[in-house]
Image (tube, rainbow, N blue to C red):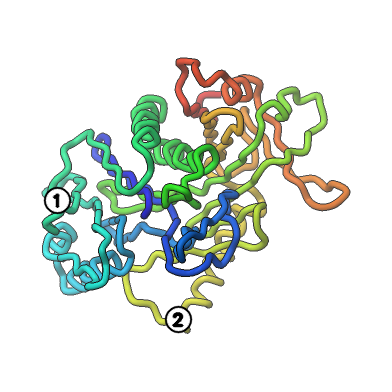
Amino acid sequence: MTYCVAWQHQGTAFLIADAAVTKRREPTSSHSTFGELHPFEKGFAVEESAIKLFRWPKLALTGAGDATTIRKLVWEIDKLLERGYPPWLALFAARPQPDANSQVHLEAVAATRMFGRVRLFRLTVQGEWELVPSDTTIHLGSPAIELKHLVHNVIGDAQKICTTTRAQLACVLATCQSLTVHHYLMAQGAGGAFSGLIVDRRGTHWQPDLGYLILDPENAVADESQPPQVQHGLHVSCAVRDDILFVSSSVRRGALAFISSTKQLNPAALLPRVTSAFALARDARDNRKYDFAAVISTRTSRVFVGEMVGRAETPYLKLEYGRTDENLALFVRMEKRVSNFLKADEQSPASHVLFLSDQAA
């Protein structure tokens, strides 16, 4: 299965999806980039191996269910767009074509402008697209209802505390990603790196560059007079270039590339495209020039998101690399109130996500 979430706020739509895919074979790697064990049982594996968001200049779509059926639907929409159909009409005219051997129900949600407004649409069981009412959150896929409830609450929090759509998306992305740390989504048929899209009056836009730190906030340095302290946590970077999601993780060597394509690809053309896009994404990874950095606490389900504005530090968080006896390690310094928030008792009434921007400094 999978986990996708979509919502709309003040004329902007947001789509988020995980990267886990269920396959009838052994996994090619033991763990996801966020440290989740890839399970293998009864001949089926759940493995991080795909980006499930599909983007056109004025239309975005994600889905859960049979991957072949979703791809056929995407290709049909693309052909209609090439014939000159308006995005909303191409969406309505396309029909899912289930594989004869598939027993998995297809769920999908899409966002585009129709009659001057950005709107969300959901695929019904009859294969028709229906308009989603405003201020409605759509959850697709397999995770437990309490996890979906947590994400729903954070969406509401993000709408209140974030002044930009990019910050809203970063906060909800980080919260979805925290589920992979705290709840082992792979056992629920979902997980891996989450990715996101924004659809507004200007068109479709990929998520901002995000750096993730999964660590115990007790060990984070809150006093700048102290030397930085080595964190034995997890560092992951996510950047999208040319419709390719690059995920670099301290769990595994090298970077994973997940290609989102609305067309049937020629395998011979993939390598130069990925190589070119990776060169563009590498700067964010190597120099930590993220748009946002998210710190996920290993103690509770709390998440801190800081706006980096293309730098390796904010007034609240500083990232730097240093040499240890064995290898290159990531050092972290954070403001005391951030550390206190991340290690706060789970019963505290405070929000599960804290967002701080340079503009508030």
| Foreground residue among 241 and 28 | 28
Tell me the quarter of the picture where residue 76 sits.
Answer: bottom left
Query: Residue at the front extreme?
Result: 42
Q: Which residue is drawn at 18% across and 53% down?
A: 123
Residue 171 position within the rendered picture, expressed as x and y whole percent measured from the top left: 45, 36
Query: Who comes first in sequence, dot 1 or dot 2?
Result: 1
Q: Is residue 145 above or below residue 107?
A: above
Q: Quadrant of the N terminus?
A: bottom left
Left or right: 29 in relation to 139: right
Residue on which the image places disc 2: 267
Label 1, secondary structure: give it.
strand
Tell me the quarter of the picture where residue 252 sits.
Answer: bottom right
**Disc 1 and disc 2: Cα gap in Å?**
35 Å
Query: Residue at the bottom extreme?
Result: 268
Q: Is residue 248 above or below residue 357?
A: below
Q: Residue at x 72, y 29 (%)?
A: 219
Q: Is residue 128 above or below residue 349?
A: below
The reply to whether dot 1 and dot 2 touch (C-beta < 8 Å) is no
Residue 266 position within the rendered picture, expressed as x and y whole percent measured from the top left: 41, 82
Q: In which quarter of the image is the C terminus?
A: top right
Residue 2 position within the rendered picture, expressed as x and y whole percent measured from the top left: 37, 52
Disc 2 residue type?
A: Pro
Left or right: 30 in relation to 179: right
Q: Residues within 10 Å of mark 2 (few under 14, many from 20)?
A: few
Q: Residues within 10 Å of mark 1 (few under 14, many from 20)?
A: few
Residue 85 position within the rendered picture, expressed as x and y whole percent measured from the top left: 14, 67
Q: Residue at x 57, y 45 (%)?
A: 211
Disc number placed over residue 114 in the picture, else none: 1
Q: Residue at x 37, y 48 (%)?
A: 3
